[in-house]
Amino acid sequence: MTPDIKICGLKTPDAVDLAVERGATHIGFIFFEKSPRHIDAMTAGILADRVRGWAKIVAVTVDADHEELEEIIAFLKPDILQLHGRETPEQVLGIKAMFGLPVMKAFAVRSADELRKIDAYEGLADRFLFDAKPPEGSDLPGGNGVSFDWKIMGALDDSVDYMLSGGLNANNVALALSATKARGIDVSSGVESAPGVKDLHKMNAFFDAIDQWRRTGSKGVET
């Protein structure tokens, strides 16, 4: 299996270019002012235009209203909307109907029981993303650099299409891929030298680790 690879929280041309050159299938732009990875819609659109058609463009929002979404979509022209807040099933359905774009709904989880959060969204969201619950006191729903016990993902039906996120980096991405049936992985802080600052060396190491996993599969990887 070749997983989709999403590099999220991009803000600079060199990081966008490298992500796609190394094989990212998705690139994410974050529209959440509390995040160090926040970017304005116009700048994100300019960056996305560099690689449009080579990777899917993902707009990451947190409980954005329709006016905010309209502005983001107008400038970015995303392929996918990632909803990383507390959006209800009704809101997901309304957003899809209004904007005509696929939706990836994110959930923060810690236990297998919490995976059942997706039940009300099945058939509405086009894909799911599972992230670790943020540390106490964090204002960020994602990008906190913490992971969760990936073994809980075994409780999901094999038919569930999801991306795995939360604390991934070059040192553990092979283990994460071997421990789960994730059809996609999402990394942000794990390829940064500081919050919001993508590190090209760490990005290359991350892709190198995935390439190595592809060659060897789960051989030598303890789960």
Image: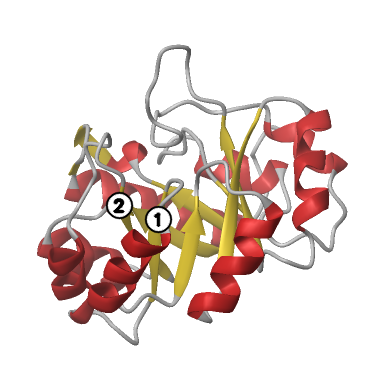
- What secondary structure is marked by label 2? strand
Q: Residues within 10 Å of mark 1 (few under 14, many from 20)?
A: many
User: If the image is split into quadrants, where does the N terminus sit?
Assistant: bottom right
Give amino acid for label 1: Val
Disc 1 target residue: 60
**In the figure, residue 193 lies in which quadrant?**
top left
**Residue 67: x and y, percent?**
34, 63
| Location of residue 207 (image quadrant) | bottom left
Splitting the image into 4 quarters, where does residue 208 fall?
bottom left
**Direction from residue 66 to residue 194 in the image, left or right:** left
Res 2 seen here: no
Looking at the image, which is closer to me, 177 or 9?
Answer: 9
Residue at 48 percent across and 55 percent down: it is: 210
Question: Element type at marker 1?
Answer: strand
The quadrant of the rendering that contains the C terminus is: top right
Circles 2 and 1: CB distance less than 8 Å? Answer: yes
Percent position of residue 139, x then y: 37, 25
* Residue in front for this viewpoint, 65 or 92: 65
Q: Position of residue 105 (x, y in %)?
A: 60, 54
User: Is residue 173 in view?
Assistant: yes
Q: Amino acid at mark 2?
A: Phe
The reply, left or right, for residue 210 in relation to residue 120 is left
Q: Residues within 10 Å of mark 2 (few under 14, many from 20)?
A: many
Task: Name the residue tied to disc 2.
Answer: 31
